[in-house]
Amino acid sequence: MRSIFLLVSCCLLSSILSAQTIVAEIIGQNRNMEKAYNTGNVTAIATYYTNNAAIVGPRTEVTGNPAIVEYWKGLEGRHVKWTLENTEITPYEDVVIQRGISHLQFYQDEKIVQSDVRFTLVWIKEDNQWKINIDHYSPL
């Protein structure tokens, strides 16, 4: 009986540590994306998306990494600041669901515009790295 308890405890601890590691990896990817934007390397953000990823929002649907590069390229030279606020990161076996709020500032007509949106990201492993497969956003 004692060995069964020990085995179950080890499995639970392993699952908890694995989930914590995955959450830390996703947050790390978020910080890397923010850094790319904040330093003006906006097209590098596309490297955090899978080859077949989709970005879906109001009046927006972009599919495939080449199109996602072009999507982010639209902010080239207009970047100001980006922060991602995480409200929930839920790891499953092969998929992670992340919800949060994106605070993005950019120049439009020589004025700084603030874009705050609620987002849901579906992350999957591609090339042994967590990448965004679906990026859905809507205005707050």
Image: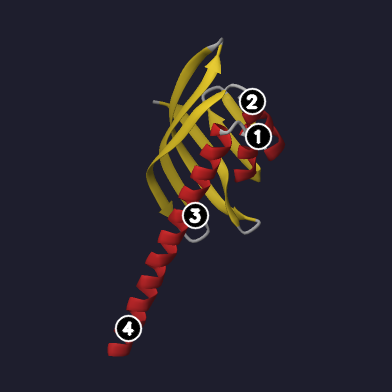
Observer able to see residue 72 = yes
Q: On the rendered structure, is 10 left or right of 68?
A: left
Q: Secondary structure at mark 1?
A: helix
Q: Position of residue 73 (x, y in %)?
A: 66, 28
Name the residue carrying label 1: 43
* Residue at image mark 4: 6
* Viewer-proximal residue among 110 and 6: 110
User: Counting residues from the N terminus, which is met first, the one under dot 4 or under dot 3?
Assistant: 4
> Which quarter of the figure has residue 47?
top right
Check the picture and name the quadrant holding the C terminus: top left
Residue 1 appears in the figure: no
- Counting other residues with Cα less than 10 Å from the Cα at mark 4, is it few (<14), some (14-19), or many (20 or more)? few
Which residue does the numbered mark 2 point to in the structure image? 76
Quarter of the image for residue 64 reads top right
Report if the CB atoms under discs 1 and 2 are less than 8 Å apart. yes
The amino acid sitting under disc 3 is Glu
Q: Are marks 4 and 1 in contact (CB under 8 Å)?
A: no
Label located before the other in sequence (1 or 2): 1
**In the image as oriented, which residue stretches furthest toward the top?**
109
